[in-house]
Image: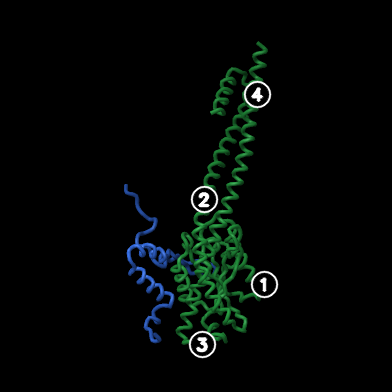
Chain colours: A green, B blue
Amino acid sequence: MLARSSQAFARAAATQRLAAAAPPNARNMATLRELELRLKSVRNIAKITKSMKMIASTKLAKAQRAMQAGKQYGDANSEVFNHTSTEEQPKRKLFIVVSSDKGLCGGIHSSVTKATRRAFAGEEQEAPDADSPIMVIGDKSKAQLSRVLGQNMVLTFNQIGRDIPTFADACGVADLIVKSDVKYDVVNIVYNKFVSALSYEAGVYVVMNEHGLKEAPGFKAYEMEDDVTKDLAEFSLANAIFAALVEGHACEQSSRRNAMDNASKNAGDMIDSLTLQYNRGRQAAITNELVDIITGASAL
Amino acid sequence: MSSATWRQFFSFNKYSQITARAVRQSLKETERAAAEKRGLTALRYQNWENGKGGEQVYLNPPETPVGKGTPAV
């Protein structure tokens, strides 16, 4: 195109001159070539981030609908537990950290990890036991937490969140938790709460275990059988995990869309400034060639 | 039922998943396709000891082996 023809022109003019004049020209052309390569790579990256943003926006719409439906399960749970609060403070808390496996989605993984670390440091509430077990859903948070609280990790899960999380996922997780025989007084599910399409914040679902339910005064009034109470405790754990999973999934999609949007904007800005630089360099090279030719012509 | 024999074998969550699978498989063809998607889970888990992760185990092992295939030639 114009750049190539001007370079060919410059090359043809250079061969008719002394060798001493060639190096500065060669340096300019090298810079032009570098700029061209950079421009090409930034344009490709901009295309990728733009397409990722499109995909994330379509997934976000679906994820938000699933979240509205799934939150009903978590809210129903909270209703039951609101009326069955226990007096004594639970000491041994099981932390379930809900995140995902994929990256390029802004700060959701670190948000949940930081909330867990704050809880262990005991900032808002009383600090739990130092050996309180932690279970992590999602490889990214697992990597972050294993560096800090690795000794407390008991069980980790992955391959959730590729598509909208299903209740089967949540049931599988709850079943494995129960089968692993981890001892705890209460479960804290740390997840990302969906505030709006542009922001999220870390939140906690509190789920009592079977023993806590049995001792709660509001619950004792019903005189349920032990078997059924155990079932209710396990089912409410699965409910809470499901609500946290779908809400976390919606947060992930919105965060990825925002991150890719910012990346595309930044790439667009880079392309603009690089194009200006490239054009300036190209015009300088052409002007130099013209000056050389004209002075050469005037000398003849 | 108060004297259910399934309690000694699995938890309530597993019980509900089994019954859900039975219901899904009994639906009409059109509804079944949509319902099957709600029962999918590719969950993998690993046990951790002393800050070290164990082996990754599939909860429902996939039928076709993932990844490791030999080229045709």
Q: Which residue is mark 4?
A: A288
Asked if residue A49 shows in the view, the reply is yes
Three-letter amino acid code at the position of disc 3: Tyr
Looking at the image, is mark 2 or mark 3 earlier in the sequence? Answer: 2
Are there few (<14), some (14-19), or many (20+) residues within 10 Å of tag 4?
some
Looking at the image, is mark 2 or mark 1 earlier in the sequence? Answer: 2
In-image side of A64 versus A292 (left or right):
left
- Frontmost residue, A209 versus B51: A209
Determine the CA span between mark 2 and mark 1: 38 Å
Determine the CA span between mark 1 and mark 3: 33 Å
Location of residue A106 in the rendering, given as x and y in whole percent from the top left corner: 58, 56
Looking at the image, is mark 1 or mark 3 earlier in the sequence? Answer: 1
Say whether marks 4 and 1 touch (CB < 8 Å). no
* Label 3 secondary element: loop
Determine the CA span between mark 4 and mark 1: 68 Å
Q: Chain of mark 3?
A: A
Mark 4 vs mark 2: in front = 2
- Frontmost residue, B60 versus A59: A59
Give residue A126's quadrant in the image.
bottom right
Q: Which residue is mark 1?
A: A124
Determine the CA span between mark 4 and mark 2: 45 Å
Q: Which residue is mark 3?
A: A222
In-image side of A119 versus A40 (left or right):
right
Q: Which residue is mark 2?
A: A54
> Does label 1 lie on the same chain as label 2?
yes
The relative height of residue A192 versus residue B71 in the rendered view (above or below) is below
Say whether marks 2 and 3 touch (CB < 8 Å). no
Location of residue A31 in the rendering, given as x and y in whole percent from the top left corner: 61, 33
* Label 2 secondary element: helix
Three-letter amino acid code at the position of disc 4: Asn
Mark 1 vs mark 3: in front = 3
Say whether marks 1 and 3 touch (CB < 8 Å). no
